[in-house]
Image (spheres, helix red, strand yellow):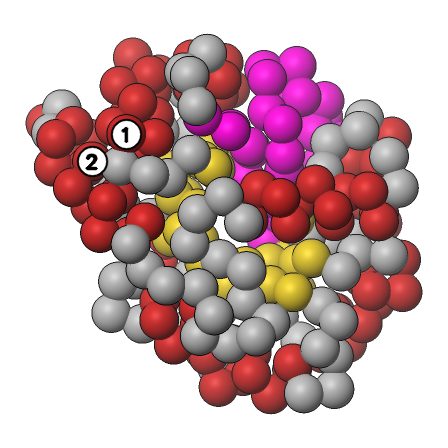
Amino acid sequence: MTPQQASQAAAKVCELAPVVPVLVIDDAGTAAALATALVAGGLPALEVTLRTPAALEAISEMAAVEGGVVGAGTLLTTADVEAAKKAGATFGVSPGATDYLLDACEANDLPLLPGAATATEAMRLLERGYTVQKFFPAEASGGAPALKAIGAPLPQIKFCPTGGVSLKNANDYLSLPNTLCVGGSWVAPKNMVQAGDWDGITALAKEAAALKVG
Ligand code: 3PG
């Protein structure tokens, strides 16, 4: 898969809803119910971070949920890419980007949303052909004003800002012309997942899905 094809696929994922939930799953037994609750609330694209031992099994469980589009986050290595793909992930997300990681995603046909936090990082990815990127860590890197400023000289790059994004500030990003969607963990709070409060999570998802893009 070329970087251009990867970016086209990543854009399609980003355009499914204003928010991509970023999920840290401790118990794969909760994965299907969590995905079902989020999809029911209007958030079909789900990022499961490869940060817990349960993550790969959670991806498999979620990939079977109707209407869900499941990706793997925190991709760092070639082994991560191969394992994510095998588990059923249809896209990948990474906090930054290295040549090894880009090579692995391209070789394994896994569309990647690669992370960038500066103009130089975004330009390096653009040189390779990645026009859709994750702006990370969004709030710590200057938030919406920084992303707006990057968009002035680099309007051809579209972003999914992630990291410190919440219902409070999501609009600041979503109103920018270079933002396709935002990523965030606020739609799946740990305590609600542990309590099995799926209706509560669907309500949070509905609130997020109602955010306006553009
Ligand atoms: C992460 O690193 O977990 C993601 O960027 C999500 O960040 P958040 O918890 O601030 O939404």
Find numbered disc 2 in the image and state the secondary structure of the residue it sits on. Answer: helix
Placement of 58 over or under 51, stated as above or below: above
Marks 1 & 2, CB-CB < 8 Å contact:
yes
Q: Residue at x 74, y 49 (%)?
A: 7
Reading the image, the residue beneath label 2 is: 202
Q: Residue at x 59, y 24 (%)?
A: 89
Image disc number at residue 40: 1
Find numbered disc 1 in the image and state the secondary structure of the residue it sits on. Answer: helix
Instruction: Give percent across and percent down for residue 122.
Output: 74, 69
**Three-letter code for the amino acid on which mark 1 is drawn:** Ala
Instruction: Give percent across and percent down for residue 190.
Output: 21, 38
Q: Earlier in the sequence, mark 1 or mark 2?
A: 1
Placement of 199 over or under 135, stated as above or below: above
209 inside magenta stretch:
no
Quarter placement of the N terminus: top right
Q: CA distance from mark 1 to mark 2?
A: 6 Å
Q: Quadrant of residue 131?
A: bottom right
Q: Which residues are magenta?
A: 68-95
Residue 7 lies left or right of residue 164; in this view the side is: right
Which residue is more in the foreground, 48 or 154? 154
The answer to whether residue 192 is seen in the rendering is yes
Q: Residue at x 60, y 71 (%)?
A: 178
Local packing at callout 2 (Cα closer than 10 Å; few below 14, some 14-19, many 20+) is many
